[in-house]
Amino acid sequence: MARAKRDAKLDTRNARRGLRHRKGPYWTLLEKGRGLGFYRPGDGSAGSWIARLHDSEAGKHRTRRLGTADDLAEADGVEVLSFAQAQAKAREWFDRARLDNGEELPGRGPFTVADAWALYREDCVRRGVKALGRLDCGAKLYILPALGEAEVEKLTQTRIEKWHAALAEAAPRRRAKKFADKVAEGPKPRTDEEKRKRRSSANRILTILKTALNLAKKKRKVTCTADTWREVGPHGNADAARVRFLNLEEQVRLVNACGPDFRRIVQAGLFTGARFGELVRLKVEDFDPKNESVFIAPGKSGKGRHVALTEEASAFFKETVAGLEGGTLLFTHEAFEGMRRIVPKTNEPVPKVHRAWKKSEQQRPMATACKVAKIAPLGFHQLRHSYASALVNAGVPLAFIAQQLGHSDTRMVEKHYGHLAPSALKDAIRKLAPTLGIHQPGNIGNLKIHGA
């Protein structure tokens, strides 16, 4: 509820008794375009409270009588109103007018960082943001505990900078055991790489906070300027390290080291550059043998895409979909793998049952395959990097690579694989650029130095 405004002329009955009768009310501004007035009658009877609302579309004011002032009788909050009660009743009328015009109601009371986060989260749900889970985690762990109760209009640049610096120095969170009472934390960053990772994480959390505050400002939930948080810059030297990728020989070794079910999804990752979460959702109808492409349903980016396949990749998918009915998942794995399943009465083996891959189920088989293949441990996402780096080295334009990976532009490709592009560009120019025939070689050559 909004705090009652103070006005020396209208606060008390004694103050109002000193007001002279005049044609119009005595007005006090409650908010822009909305005021509360007190009318002093000339016959000495109790005054009246009047609410006034400016209608910007019609270009005129609307007024409404709220009730009698408590000049001669005690206020009852219904017919006889004190100054504070008249303000509350006026704001109720203002709110009804806003709703009738299809406007949102303004917040009552201090607008906090927690309110800004709730507003931003609601906007993310409305827009169907795919990364909402990660945003929730970042806000609940790092933003709300430290800044949730802070009023946005009272936030200072110094406070945000201190909070941001503390994030970079804090120990990273670890996945806690089920039903654990305390949050699990790892050791504090010591090496340069560990410190870089913490700075990078702190910058991502800062981005969430800034985005939420900017939305609150855009929605006019706060009246302060955005300079307080806009001037807080990210930590330097926090860019991601150069991504790791497998060369062709390592890719072959990794595939050969995988178990049968996991091998197929690893092959698909190397053939398409798709994420694990995108591959496990692929169905038979997503493969188009005529156009030799695979449709990746909307995922992290919120947009679907068609990935063009090589002849080898197309042959792989044709074998994968063979014998499968429409609507069937392309990649599944054996349930209860390694368990002995025999019918007790007949002593016959139970047919194998396959089920869909679940989140994070690729981690253990990936670690095992790397160990068998004698490759330094890496995650499934590095298969995506390997796919992209192979295209860059082959001279494929960065715009085409970005389209294959599902990026809206080439910025991410340039950031992660730009160091590979110069040599690929040079080879492509020498191979593809036309010979113009506008220069005839002369007889001038480099000097040969004998005995050098």
Image (spheres, rainbow, N blue to C red):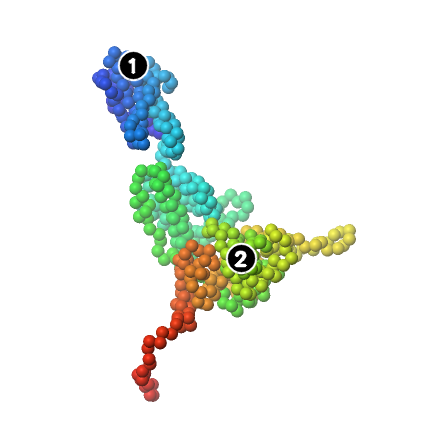
- For badge 2, the amino acid type reads Val
In this picture, is 184 found above or below 108?
below
The residue drawn where x is 38% and y is 18% is 78
Confirm whether residue 185 shows in the render. Answer: no
Give the residue displayed 36% in from the left and 74% down from the top: 436
Q: Quadrant of residue 194?
A: bottom left
Between 280 and 199, the residue placed more toward the observer is 280
Q: Vertical placement of 48 versus 282: above or below?
A: above
Left or right: 386 as drawn, with respect to 155: right
Could you tell which of marks 2 and 1 lies nearer the N-terminus? Answer: 1
Residue 24 in picture, x, y percent from top left: 24, 20
Residue identified by numbered label 1 = 46
Disc 2 crowd rating (10 Å Cα; few below 14, some 14-19, many 20+) is many
Task: Give the crowd class for mark 1: few <14, some 14-19, many >=20 residues within 10 Å.
Answer: some
Residue in view at x 25 percent, y 22 percent: 26
Can residue 314 be seen? yes
Judged from the image, the secondary structure of the residue bearing numbered disc 1 is: loop
Q: Quadrant of the N terminus?
A: top left
Question: x, y percentage for residue 39?
Answer: 27, 19
The answer to whether residue 235 is left or right of residue 346 is left
Residue located farthest toward the front when viewing the structure as drawn = 437
Quarter placement of the C terminus: bottom left
Tag of residue 440: none
Q: CA distance from mark 2 to mark 1?
A: 80 Å
Q: Nearer the viewer, residue 296 or 173?
A: 296
> Would you identify the image quadrant in which residue 334 lies?
bottom right
Along the viewing direction, whichever of 333 and 96 lies nearer the viewer: 96
The residue at 30%/42% (across/down) is 225
Q: What x and y, as percent, mark residue 203?
A: 38, 51
The disc at residue 294 is 2
**Pointer 2 with pointer 1, Cβ within 8 A:** no
- Image spot of residue 271 (x, y percent): 53, 62
